[in-house]
Structure formats: C-alpha cells, structure tokens
Image (cartoon, helix red, strand yellow):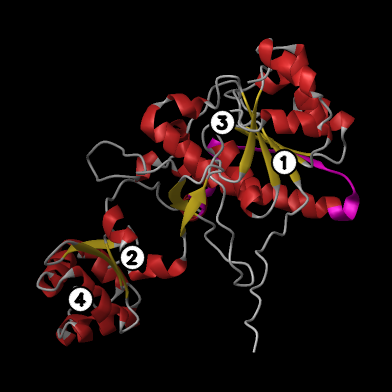
Amino acid sequence: MPAAIPPPPAAPLAGVKVIDLGQYIAGPGAAMTLAELGADVIKVEPITGDQARHIGRYGESMVRAYNRGKRSIAIDLKNALGRNIVMQLIAQADVVIQNLRPGVVEKLGIGPETVRKLHPRLIYLSISGFSGRGPSRERPGYDIAAQAESGLMSVTGEPGRLPQKVGVPIVDAAAAQLGAQAVLAALYGREKSGTGATLQTSLLEVAMHLQAANWADYLGGGPEPTRVGDGQPHNAPAAEVVPTRDGYIVLSAYADDHWRRFCQVVGREELASDPRFASNDRRVANRTDLRAVLRECLSSFSSEECVRLLSGKQIVAGAVRSYAQVLDSPDLMASGLVVDAVAADGTRYRALGLPYRIDDTPQPAPAAAPACGADSDALLSEIGYPSREIAELRLAGIVA
C-alpha cells in the first residue's frame, strides 16, 4: 500500500505581497508573521541595512528572529531614483508596513496618504511610539519608553524598590502580533469591499492593551495598581513564587475549592478551616502567614515533584525554568516550536516558528533572514529593470 502523501504546508496568504519598510522588531515582526503564513515579503532596507544590524549581538538576534522568510533589497531612499524603485514595488503590493521615525515616510513621499491615493486597494500599517493624534506623536518611541509611560513599569517589581521593565521587549513583540492581526482583518475586509485601509497603532497603545484587566479594574473605581512583586493583590495564593528543594515554582490556588484540594494534597487538611485561610479574603489579609505555610509545605519537594503533585489534582503550578531548562523540556520538544531557519547556502540557525498550527499541517523550514540587499538584483529584474540599469544603480550607490 503506498505511503500517504503528507498535506501541503499551510500557506493561507499565498499570493499576498508585502513591502516591509520597518526596522528593529515591531514592523519587521508584523511582516514576518505574514511571511510565515505564506505571503511574499520584501524587506526594503537602507543601503547600510536595518539599524538592528549595527547594534551588536542582540541586534543580530533581532534580525534573525524577525526577518525569516523575506527577501531583501537595499535602496537609498534619499535619492529620487531609489524612491521610484520603492514606488514600483509598492504598486505591485497588497500591504505596506512601516515603523520608521515619525514623519520619515511622509518626507520621502511614501507615506500612507500619498500611497493609498495612488493605490486604493493597498493596506498600509504604521506603527509608531506614541499615538499619531497626541502631543508626543513626534517623539521617537521604543519598547522601554512605552513600558514606562503606559504604567507597566509602575506595577512591575517589588514594593519599595525601583520600577522594573519586563525581561524582554514585550511591547515591541506584542505590537508586531497586533499589527499583523490588523492587517489580516483589513485583507479580509478588502475581499468584501474591494478597498484597502490605513492602519495605525502605537507602542504606547499596545502597552496599555496588555494591561486591559488592570485598567478595567482601575477605571471601574478600583485602587491604583502598585508593585507587589509576586502574588496578586486581590487573590491568594495567586501567582505566588514558592521556593522548593532545588528552585522555585509558581502556584495559584485561590478559588476555595482549589485551596481545599491543595491542603489535601500536601496532607494539611486543617489549613482549609484555619480562620486565617478559610476564605480568599482571609488569605489575602494574612498573606505573610500564608506564604510561610506554602514554604513549609513545599520546600522539601523538588520543583518537578511539586508540579506533578499539584497538577495531578488540577491545581495550577509551574516550575520557574531557565532558558536552558526550557529548551530541554519535553513539552517544548513535542511542540515543534524550535525550528531550523535555512539560508540559501545551506547554513542554518535555530529559531522559534509559528506558535500555532493550522489544520495540524507541517510548516516548511523557514528561510533564514536575508543578508542586507541579498535579493536586490532579482527584485529589480522582477519589476522590469534590465541588467545594464541594475549595474548603473549599483555603481551610483542607489542600490546595494
């Protein structure tokens, strides 16, 4: 009996062309999400390349993480001939994405108003640091500024100590995903209306959106959130960090039924009726005593033993793992999230692929992030430039 033919890779955006004018994370990340779904993404870089290519090892990691599956063309956009090339690329595109400094695309004549007047079916996404309607619209915006000015840092860290940033550029990464979501919605809308859309978001707005529950509580009359370290201000035990024999776990068992189950699992049934812990409100009021009890109950177990013991009774618990431990975890290995990104010359590096599956079909090995200008000649040929003109553009420094 012949072997079953595996299903083709899921590529719902096959045939969609995207022009990526972005740098660093937010813009390139949104474009790469579309590339992973099958779109043809053209990364338009300055002659010297995406600025992330010039900020050391972590910058190169940004390039590898957020530019897989793209083709790169390097163009001098300050030159009229260079801008003409970009306009020709845009004329054949469905989507443009940019997160350049405020006002740059407008000064270059490739802003959304100009471009969409020429191409009404185009979808144009701009990601800025701050809302385009506010007094800070001209300010440069980075992830850390959005964390600070959205209130996120004010609730991150321990009481009485310095505000802390999240350990990764979470706002940039979230802006990439929300930007891609907006583009997908606009593509669907275009199928029905025949008209594109001008899309705008900002890091500040995304950072606020990440805190939606906190803001709903505060806007509804709740107290202003503050730094509490581990734990949650209104529930206990909730998001508690508890030391174990060999590390730490996080634990949430604040529903009364979950708390009773926790007491049974650790052999301390009497704690369920202890007046200090008999309800969520009492546990919150007596959090210091509660944390001492949690340490007493769990410190003799390893982190993995705690997770098995508690999860077996449907109690939320997780081991606090280092990156090395995460990489070795069976759950990550089974997920297929870590993939090999392969370059045209066969070199490869490991990266994270799509965090979801479509019809459980395999995703193709994503192409590695391109070198700056790696596809300039091919892309120029596609829009009709003969070899002689391409050579002249290179000689003039307009294309690299």
Of callouts 4 and 1, the N-terminal one: 1
- Residue at image position (84%, 33%) is 91
| Region in magenta | 191-212
Q: Secondary structure at mark 1?
A: strand
Amino acid bearing label 3: Gln
| Camera-side mark, 2 or 1 | 1
Q: Which residue is mark 4?
A: 305
Q: Is residue 348 above or below residue 146?
A: below
Q: Which residue is mark 3?
A: 23
How busy is the neighbourhood of tag 4: few (under 14 within 10 Å), some, or many (20 plus)?
some
Label 4 and label 3: CA atoms lie apart by 44 Å
Q: Is residue 215 above or below residue 234?
A: above
Q: Is residue 358 left or right of residue 65?
A: right
| Residue 18 marker | 1
| Residue 236 figure quarter | bottom left
Name the outermost residue toward the top: 396
Rendering coords of residue 342 (x, y %): 52, 48
Amino acid bearing label 4: Glu
Label 3 and label 1: CA atoms lie apart by 15 Å
Is 360 covered by the magenta stretch? no
| Of 48 and 318, the residue lying toward us | 48
